Image: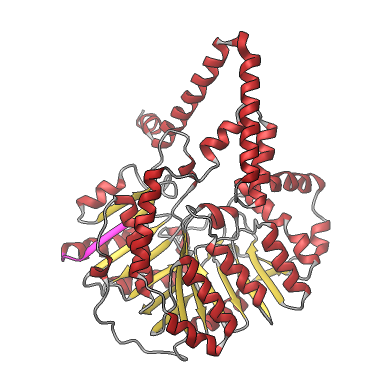
Amino acid sequence: MKFVKKFVLHRITLLVIAVLLQLGVLISVISKFNDYFIFFYGGSILISIAVVLGIINNHTNPSYKIAWIIAILLFPIFGGLFYIFWGRNKLSKRAKHKMKSIADRTKKALPPQESIIRELEEENEIAANQSRYIQNYGYYPPYHNTVSEYLPIGEIKFEKLKEELRKAEHYIFVEYFIIEEGIMWDSILDILVEKASKGVDVRVIYDDAGCLFTLPYRYNKKLEKMGIKCCVFNPLVPLLSPMLNNRDHRKITIIDGHTGFTGGINLADEYINKFQKHGHWKDSAIMLKGEAVWSMTVMFLSMWDYIRGIAEDFQQFKPITLPQVKLRNGLGYIQPFSDSPLDEETVGEIVYLNLINKARKYVYITTPYLIIDNEMVTALTSAAKGGVDIRIITPHCADKWYVHAVTRSYYRVLIESGVKIYEYTPGFIHSKTYISDDEYGVVGTINMDYRSLYLHFECGVWMYNCSGVMEMKKDFLDTLKLCRKITLEDLQNVKWHKAVGSSILRVFAPLM
């Protein structure tokens, strides 16, 4: 009886029931006016045609357009309405004004660093152009005086994170897509509660969809009672809304404005291999110490202000002095950046494309998903055809079978062009990294799929000539030893029904 009550009252059950009720009411209304069905059908077709014309003329990615157009043509009665409720990223005037206000304060807190870019230009004009793009269109400047330490596995990040959290004196900011009760989160929570009791400003943001199955309903209220300020990003409601598509996929921890973490690792036991649902979980993160952490601090505060609807003075959180850090292998250039789905600038994808298009020797990539558009396919294949050594590591074990099937559907066109594809045989690789020419590195939260590149709030760290870059390369080559190279012969042995299924799924890849 207790299980039945828990199931009935679970918010997932309530959400499903609410949506089904809405559909039931709609179908009931249609059936009541059965004699006028032809008019309803004609009206639905006209709406779908109008929606298709609107899709064709907007500035969305072409593959995303095609997927929606096919879906609408297959389901002409409800397809257009479904796109209106689910497929757009259109903001209300109030939301636009709110976003503009936050963007203006973000730009003010992060003034351009033209002197650093000019210095970089003297060293490498191509690197300077990449950095300038992030500054001009992502609004996040480059920095010196920052040490990067690459963390090649979740277990290492976990220990480093606890070590740094214990040093906090002023504030701790935590923003994650997934937080799950268990060994990892409970250990971190103990530190956060202790710090909050001593007057440290502790704040947590978690995504409601990401934590739908991992945290109890209104968990934020529980944290507030512990002295931890907490926001839930984009709470799920039982109404169809385009904003439900936009999730906070970032993973950020900031301590006192001078130490920051980001990468693919969420705060859940699977990420530190305390249990293995999909085999060994390979992930990565980066720890920064120094000036560049200020950009990460502003990222968090911008999101906090957006959710809470307040306008804090960002400058009050800027550290007056930074702790002395031991510089390794020179300064280098470090540039944290964020990407929002609420504008037309796909910063994450452009950062990736710039690295591929400008590579001279090699590009090494790790990604859990390989669901890419024509621009990315062209960039990868063109670079490989030009002699650049392109290697991509993807998972061997799937976390979602249909996504894995679509990932594998891209192998042939890439391999035929000279791209080398490897699968991580011990389990699932969740790391999102790019390394190029012993000079460039990007690590962050951005998957190579449509959701990360177009629909989610994401973040990453672009690096040039930093120690972290070579640490990333070493980890990639070590990981490669545990991988199996995929050949054209492997693809020819795929059963016909799987090949057909993958082809069908690929049509709808942008909607996954």
**Residue 161, image x and y in percent?**
36, 70
Q: Quadrant location of residue 346?
A: bottom right
**Residue 69, image x and y in percent?**
67, 39
Say left or right for 456 vs 377. Answer: left
Q: Looking at the image, is 172 positioned above or below residue 178?
A: below
Q: Nearer the viewer, residue 392 or 395?
A: 392
Q: How many marks?
A: 0
Say left or right for 379 vs 296. Answer: right
Residue located 42% across and 45% down the image: 212
Q: Residue furthest left?
A: 198
Question: Residues in magenta?
Answer: 198-204
Say left or right for 496 vs 74. Answer: right
Q: Looking at the image, is 239 positioned above or below residue 120?
A: above
Colour convention:
secondary structure
**Residue 284, image x and y in percent?**
50, 69
Q: Looking at the image, is 224 positioned above or below residue 461?
A: above
Q: Nearer the viewer, residue 361 or 427?
A: 361
Query: Is residue 113 within the magenta segment?
Result: no
Quadrant assignment for the N terminus = top left
Residue located 28% across and 53% down the image: 230
Q: Looking at the image, is 281 positioned above or below residue 331?
A: above
Instruction: Work out whether residue 325 can be spotted.
Output: yes
Residue located 69% across and 33% down the image: 73
